[in-house]
Amino acid sequence: MSQSYTHITDLAKEVQPPDEGILTRTLFNDDNVKAVIFGFGQEEELSEHTASMPAILHFLQGEANLTLGDDSVEAQPGTWIHMEPKLKHSVRTKTPVVMLLLLLKR
C-alpha cells in the first residue's frame, strides 16, 4: 500500500452531528493543508473569528447562516466558500450540519 495519498470514501460519514454542540476531527495535516471535519448540532453557533491563513468551507450536509465580513450568506449541501486570511466570519446552523474546513498553509 502506498503512503503517498489519503483516501476517504464519504466525507459526510466522517463525523455524526451531535444533538447539541460542535464536534471536530482533523482528517489530514501536513505542511500545505489541514483538513478538519465539523459536525454541528441544530442551532449551534461558531462565533465571529478570523483565520491567519486562507481557508475553504465546504458544506456537505445541512443548512446554516454565515457572516463573511459584512455579508450574510446561506449555506446548504454543496456550498463552497474560499476566504482570504483575517476575514471575520461566523457560522450559525439552522439544521444539523457537516462541514469540511481546509486551512491552506503558505
Image: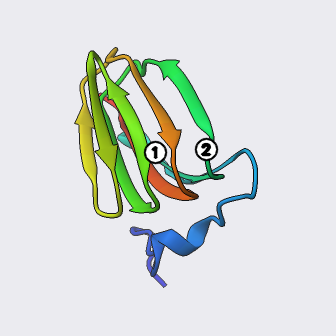
Q: Secondary structure at mark 1?
A: loop
Residue pictured at 46% horizontal, 45% vertical = 30
Which residue type carries mark 2?
A: Glu
Residue 23 location (% of width, % of height): 69, 49
Residue 30 tag number: 1
Residue pictured at 48% horizontal, 18% vertical = 49
Residue 76 location (% of width, % of height): 35, 57
Which residue type carries mark 1?
A: Asp
Pick the front one: 52 or 12? 12
Pointer 2 or 1: first along the chain: 1
> In the rendered image of this protein, does residue 49 appear above or below residue 1?
above
Residue pictured at 43% horizontal, 54% vertical = 63
The answer to which quarter of the image holds residue 15 is bottom right
Pick the front one: 72 or 18? 72
Disc 2/disc 1 C-alpha distance (Å):
32 Å
Residue 43 tag number: 2
For residue 32, side relative to residue 61 (left or right): left
